[in-house]
Amino acid sequence: MDDDMQASAIGIRVHSGWGALVAVAGEPGALEVVERRRIEIVDRNAAGAAQPYHFAKDLELAEAKKFIANSGAASAQSALTAMREIVDELKGKAYNVVAAAILLSAGRPLPDLEKILGSHPMIHTAEGEFFRHAFRDACESLKIPVTGIRERELDERTKSVLGKDAGSLKKKIAGLGKTLGPPWTSDQKTATLAAMIALAEQDNS
């Protein structure tokens, strides 16, 4: 890495059709939020784009497979375009993105498509994985090492990676909204914590 560039990492908390992204730099005791934004990766005017499995359940199975595959390709391209833009902007500010973390649900492995479409809870699980996959593919295409962190394991992972700094870091993140301003919800807080874990793990590798 160029000596003039500072290492940074990205954290993403994914929703249907979009992700809350935060980029961080610095040590746990001197955390710097260098970017935060909402990344839309669907065309909201396109039928079924934000909820592809909900839309596909009313289609014949072959059509459902085709629709989900096409939707996946479109979302992946949108995620790649958005992530490339952010990485380039950060480079322009002398930050080099060295890692990324995507927050995961506690969902179990998915069955085949026919079984997914026959279960409403499974449809929700599949859509979460669908959009996380788009962001993961984008990171991998940009050669950014990416890790998945289950939300329920976030505290444990923080303690494991950051040790004695874990508690103070969580308090600092919780209070950042006072200086950064809104939005500073659980989306941004958990994405920031995940990004700091990814950055620390990359530093230690």
Image: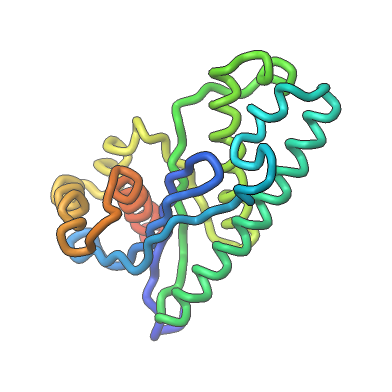
Camera-nearest residue between 120 and 138: 120
Q: Which residue is drawn at 60% across and 56% down?
A: 79
Quadrant placement of the C terminus: bottom left
Location of residue 123 with respect to 4 vertically, above or below = above
Image position, residue 32 (x, y; %): 26, 67
Specify whether 84 is left or right of 169.
Answer: right
- Residue 43 is left or right of residue 91, and the answer is right
Residue 46: image location, x then y, percent: 68, 46
Q: Residue at x 77, y 36 (%)?
A: 67
* 112 to the left or right of 131: right
Q: Quadrant of residue 54?
A: top right
On screen, residue 152 above or below 79: above
Q: Where is residue 126 in the image (x, y as percent from the top left)?
A: 60, 29
The furthest residue to the front? 45
**Residue drawn at point x = 65 percent, y = 59 percent:** 141
**For residue 17, which quarter of the picture?**
top right
* 123 versus 128 height, above or below: above
